[in-house]
Amino acid sequence: MKLNNLLSVAAIYMAVVGFGFILFPEAFGRGALPADPSPTLISYLRLWGSPLIGIAVLNWKVRKEGPSKALDAIVVGNIVGFAVMTLLDAWGLLNEARPVTKVFVVVHLVFTLAFIIIGRKRLSKNNMV
């Protein structure tokens, strides 16, 4: 897979999740939210959709760019972001998270490894991770 394809897939994934949190917070939080979540909790979930959409746009806009320090930073940011998500998902599983978390562990781990393997090949010569 090429880096531009990986960035495209990551952008689409982040946009879907981001808009999901904003437009359908109760559906995206099913199994993790109480039966009658407060408006404050729903607002909080919606808030967290916003940066995901921003990351989606960033990945989408840079997907066809050549090697640069900016692209390097975006690749490293994706590695860190997806790695932290993977770790938090795994931590959740150890602390009785909802069953669907197993799926997210795999999805986020695949993104992490893909950005490490594919992204590192494309890093500019002066910015090796």
Image (tube, grey):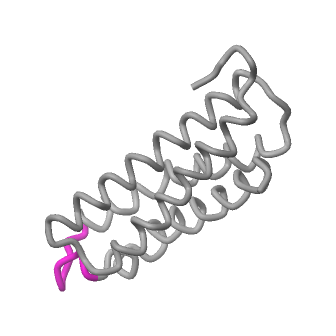
Q: Is residue 8 above or below residue 76?
A: below
Residues in magenta, as a range: 31-39
Q: Is residue 75 above or below residue 105?
A: above
Q: Percent from the top left, x then y, of residue 71?
A: 71, 31
Q: Residue at x 70, y 26 (%)?
A: 70
Left or right of 1, for residue 87? left
Q: Residue at x 25, y 81 (%)?
A: 31
Q: Quick one: which residue is furthest to the bottom in this view? A: 35
Left or right of 65, for residue 23? left
Q: Quadrant of residue 123?
A: top right
Q: Is residue 99 magenta?
A: no
Q: How many marks on residues?
A: 0
Q: Is residue 90 above or below residue 66?
A: below
> The C terminus lies in which quarter of the figure?
top right
Q: Residue at x 57, y 54 (%)?
A: 53
> The N terminus lies in which quarter of the figure?
bottom right
Q: Is residue 38 magenta?
A: yes
Left or right of 98, for residue 106? right
Q: Residue at x 63, y 35 (%)?
A: 74
Q: Percent from the top left, x then y, of residue 12?
A: 66, 63
Q: Percent from the top left, x then y, of residue 92?
A: 23, 63
